[in-house]
Amino acid sequence: MAPAGQPTQLARIGLWGAPQSGKTTFLAALNIAAISQPSVPGSPSWIVIGADDDAGAFLSENTDLLQSQHVFPSATPGMTALSWRFIGPPRGGRLAGRALRRGPRPENTVFVVELLDVAGRYFGGSAPKNSLISASVFDDDEADAPDEWELLLDHLSMCDGLVYLFDPVREQRNSDAFEFFQRTLEQVTRRCFEANRLRGGKLPHFLAVCVTKFDEPAVFRQAFRTGVVLTGDEPERIPRVPDNLAKAFFDRLCDDSHEGTARLVRGSISKYFQPDRVSYFVSSSVGFYIGPSGYFRAHDFTNVVKTGGEARIRGSIRPINVLEPFLWLEESTRAAARKR
C-alpha cells in the first residue's frame, strides 16, 4: 500500500510482443530509463520501485546485467507476474489546486503497474478454441498450458492499457508479426465483447505501439531515410524520432513490408482500437553507443555486438522511449477516468 496521503492508482498494463522482440529487456531497462531522466528544474521526474520483493529483485538484478555485466537478461521461459510503483510529481487536474482539509497536500503521484511478463510464444500459433495447445506453442506441461493461455487472455482483456512491441528486425527476417498479434487480439476482443466492454465496436484499451530496436543499424538507417530522425538537445546529440513522427515511421515500415505481415498488423490496429486511444513510440532498450568523443557518431553507433556467438552490450545503457509509453498510458487512463 502507498503511504498515507499518497493516493495510488492501479494501472493494469499488458505487454505484448513476438518472441525475441525484447519484452524482458524492455522491462529491465525501465529502472535505468527512470534514473537517466535529466534533472531539469520544473521537469517531471519519476522513480520506479518494485511493489513487492520479486518485482524489486527483477529490476535490480536485470539493471546489473545490462549496465554492469553488459549482457542481456534471459528470455522469460513462461509467465511471471510483476508489479511496480511509479512515483512522480503531483499531477494536474481538478484536485491539484484544491485545498485539502484533512492532512498535508500529497507530495507525490503514485501509480502501480501490474503486468504479466510472458514468453513470446504464448502469443503465436493457431489452436482452435477448446483444443489442446500444441507443445510447439507451450514448452511447459501440456495439461497446464491451456490454463496459462486463458490466464494471459483474461489479464489482457481486463487491462487498461497495452504496450505492443513491434520488432521490425524480426518482421524483416520472419514475416510473422501478424501471427503473434492477431490470434491474441481476436481472443481478447471476444472476452471484451462477452463482458460488454467494447466501445463503439472497438476495444476499450489504450494502446502504446512501440517500434523497437531503434539502435539496430537497419532500423536507424530506415528512420533516417524516412526523414523522421531529429538530433537530441543533450550534449551527446542522441538521435530520436519524436512522438508526432513515430506513426509515420511505423507506416513506412508497414508500406515497405512487401512480403511481410506488418500491413495486416496496421490494419488490425485500425479496426480493433479507437484511433484517439493509440499512440506510437520509437524505442530502444539499450540505446546507441557513445564512444570517447562523448557524442553520437553516425559511423560508430552500434551498441550490441556479437562475441563468441553471444550478443553483448558495448557501452552504457541509454534507453529511448522505454519509460514514456507507461507514463502516457497512466496519464491517458487517469484522464479517461475523470471523464466518466
Image (tube, grey):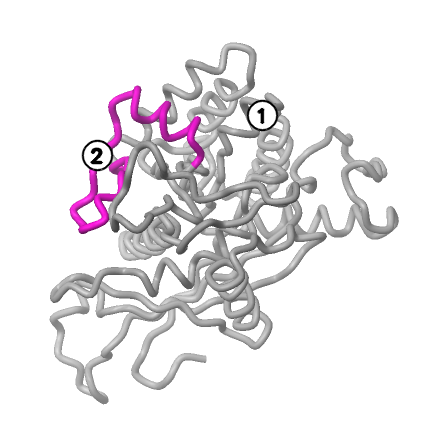
Name the amino acid, label 1. Answer: Phe
Residue 176, compared with residue 302, is above or below; it is: above
Q: Residues within 10 Å of mark 2 (few under 14, many from 20)?
A: some
Q: Residues within 10 Å of mark 1 (few under 14, many from 20)?
A: some
Q: Which residues are magenta?
A: 216-243
Q: What residue is disc 2 on?
A: 230
Image disc number at residue 178: 1
The residue at the far bottom in this view is: 103
Q: Position of residue 264 (x, y in %)?
A: 52, 19
The quadrant in which the N terminus is found is bottom left
Q: Could you say which is closer to the camera, residue 292 or residue 61?
A: 292
Q: Residue placed at 42% from the left, 14% from the top?
A: 255
Q: Does dot 2 land on a helix, a strand or a loop?
A: strand
Q: Could you say which is closer to the camera, residue 92 or residue 216?
A: 216
Q: Position of residue 192 (x, y in %)?
A: 55, 42
Q: For residue 224: magenta?
A: yes
Give the distance between the C-alpha atoms of the residues marked 1 and 2, in whole angstroms.
30 Å
Displayed quadrant of residue 260? top right
Q: Position of residue 27 (x, y in %)?
A: 50, 55
Q: Could you say which is closer to the camera, residue 310 or residue 271?
A: 310
* First along the sequence among labels 1 and 2: 1
Displayed quadrant of residue 194? top right
Q: Could you say which is closer to the camera, residue 198 or residue 58?
A: 58
